[in-house]
Amino acid sequence: MPSVSAQPPGLISQFKPLVTYGRRALVLVWQTSPALTIALGLLTLVAGLLPASIAYVGKWLVDSVVAAIQDDGPTRAVWFWLSIEAVLVAAMAAVQTGLNICNSLLRAQLGQRVNVMILEKAQQFELAQLEDAEFYDRLTRARREASSRPLSLVQKTFGVIQNGIAILSFSGLLFAFSPWAVLLLVAGGLPAFFAEAKFAGQAFRLFRWRSPETREMMYLESVLAREDYTKEVKLFGLAPRLLDRYKSIFRKIFREDRALTIRRGWWAFGLGMVGTVALYAAFAWVVLATVAGQLSLGEMTMYMMVFKQGQSAVSASLTSINGMYEDHLYLTSLYEFLEQPVRTTVGSVARGEQPGTGLEITDLSFRYPGSDALALDGINLALKPGSSLALVGENGSGKTTLTKLIAGLYELEQGDIKLDGTSLRDWNPRALQDRIGVIFQDFARYQWLVGHNIGAGDVRSFDSEEHWRQAAKKGLADDFISDLPAGYQTQLGRWFKDGRELSGGQWQKIALARAFMRSKADILILDEPTAAMDAKAEAEVFQHFQAMASEQILILISHRFSTVRQADRIAVMDAGRIIELGSHEDLMTLNGHYARLFELQAAAYR
Ligand code: ADP
């Protein structure tokens, strides 16, 4: 995994990447909104120039007042400078308001943009990647601060520019007093800056190391607060245990945070004092020069103001630079995520070389990423259109894995699966998906309208009520849907107002209907699609499927032999291999594994 340098940056290395950070921030805002970028740029320039102008006008104001005192009575010059000063201060307030407005507008747009970038990228990954814990961490990290960090980097970049302009214009004024004064101004802020830089790096490292713990906390939160877990959490009395774990992780994280926060605070205070000493040394210097008659009273006021504000500008820009470092580290993890390679070898074939030949699986073996054991081990199987196959075997024998590979959810490793004579590796993923209708055991229960839950099976007909109805009829769902209060427009799930809950069997019918949305699909995969139905209903569903599927390939996973026996062929799986293959009659005659299991289940019904 590419790692972000966690070393606190030195002086040179601190300033060099600034250009990179700044450029990245500017590109991001520019892409988000060119108009806002221009507005921000102009306002920043003006906001940078105004403070020195105000100080300069202040000098003329004080000197004109002193002159007026000596001449007895206010003169026009006093009123003139006073009005100019008032106008400048008002302008400063207006510019600040403008900057705030720009930032608020940018916040919404930038957060949305980055979130969309992350979500779009997440769609490009393979299932295998999404199931990987480290990958998931990266995704979580990227999402967690997507709406705050990029904006913060942009704000700080403009902040540094604004303060930079201010410091330059202050230095211009100070230079007339003494070049050493300029040096004193800048040097006073440096110690605090280095302390900040050191701690910013440490804080980020903590944040990164902690990903697994944070992930566990988020997981516990969802188990404790999500409706689909509450039943078990309550019944088993899990809550106190889970809450304890949740609290103890927090305590650990907090201990580390507290230590860092306290250390950071005291260092900031101590080194900040250096700045205060520098400031008062400068004041003393200016006062002495005034007493000695080298400076007018107006100049003294100006220099004092310039010192005070200049020092604030120095420390503000240095703090911003450190913050930029932290934000930049975040953006680095974001880009690390966005630049993560996706499967590049996407096939382009939309039609097989030998249409009508069906599925052909040769020497197929598969291992899940990060796992030692083979989930599939040397599978050979041919499936002609119009035939059905039932997969049976113990849990973990590889049945679901085989169907997931056929559905193209994982990249093939060893061996091959051909559809119509062409390897799945060469098929265009979209074209392949059109050919396959799947229902998995853990099918999704979307909290949408009933119709959309069915329409999800084919995005092109997502909104088409006519297609929903056809699919629902095939999936045997039409009857109960018609009895719902708003029919296909009924809202499902509790997240939304008036949402209805369905029974397990009803959900399964919805899932069946969803699989039928792909009217062109000629491979239907049913992974225990009817577990929540009774045996009779399941047998009916399967007969119904077989009757419809004269040109289709039907693959069924079931533990019910009353259904399984109806399939043309049955494959018995064990530890990733097919150990028996044939029709019900063949396998009964063979009197092996299948026959034993069948007898066992039949005996239970007698
Ligand atoms: P079945 O459908 O026959 O119950 P599976 O195909 O689900 O079996 O599982 C086959 C093997 O692969 C099991 O040993 C299981 O632990 C493993 N396995 C299944 N899914 C994953 C996954 N997403 N990641 C890693 N291993 C998995």
Image: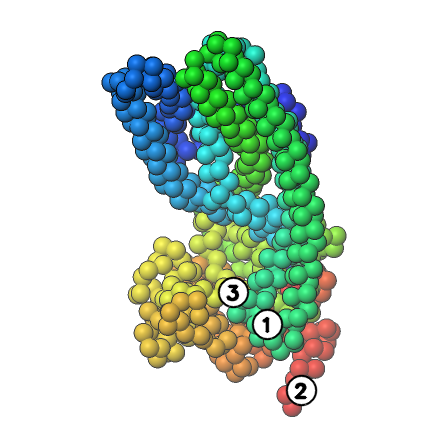
Residue 556 falls left or right of residue 463: right
User: What SS does tag 2 mark?
Assistant: helix
Which image quadrant: the C terminus? bottom right
Q: As rendered, which of 332 and 309 lies closer to the eye?
A: 309
Q: Are marks 3 and 1 in contact (CB under 8 Å)?
A: no
Give the tally of numbered discs.
3
Residue 363 image position (x, y, % from top left): 67, 52
In this view, 515 is above or below 368 = below
- State how far apart marks 3 and 2 are (Cα): 30 Å
Q: Secondary structure at mark 3?
A: loop
Q: Circle 1 sits in a helix, a strand or a loop, which is it?
A: loop
Is 179 rendered above or below residue 339? Answer: above
Q: Residue furthest left?
A: 76
Q: Earlier in the sequence, mark 2 or mark 1?
A: 1
Lower position in the chain sequence, tag 3 or tag 2:
3
Kind of residue sitting beneath label 1: Ser
Where's ligand 1: which quadrant?
bottom right
Q: Are marks 2 and 1 in contact (CB under 8 Å)?
A: no
Residue placed under numbered mark 3 in the picture: 443
Binning the other alpha carbons within 10 Å of mark 3 as few (below 14), some (14 to 19) or many (20 upward) gives: some
Which residue: 56% across, 55% down? 406
Tell me the colour scheme of the image: rainbow
Residue 399, how many percent across, how many down? 63, 63
Alpha-carbon distance for marks 2 and 1? 17 Å
Disc 2 under 8 Å from ligand 1? The reply is no
Q: Amino acid at mark 3?
A: Phe
Q: Say which residue label 2 marks.
A: 604
Q: Earlier in the sequence, mark 3 or mark 1?
A: 3
User: Which of the pair 449/566 is nearer the observer?
Assistant: 449
Find residue 18 and report its image quarter: top right
Which residue, given by chain and number where applicable, does mark 1 sit on?
A: 558
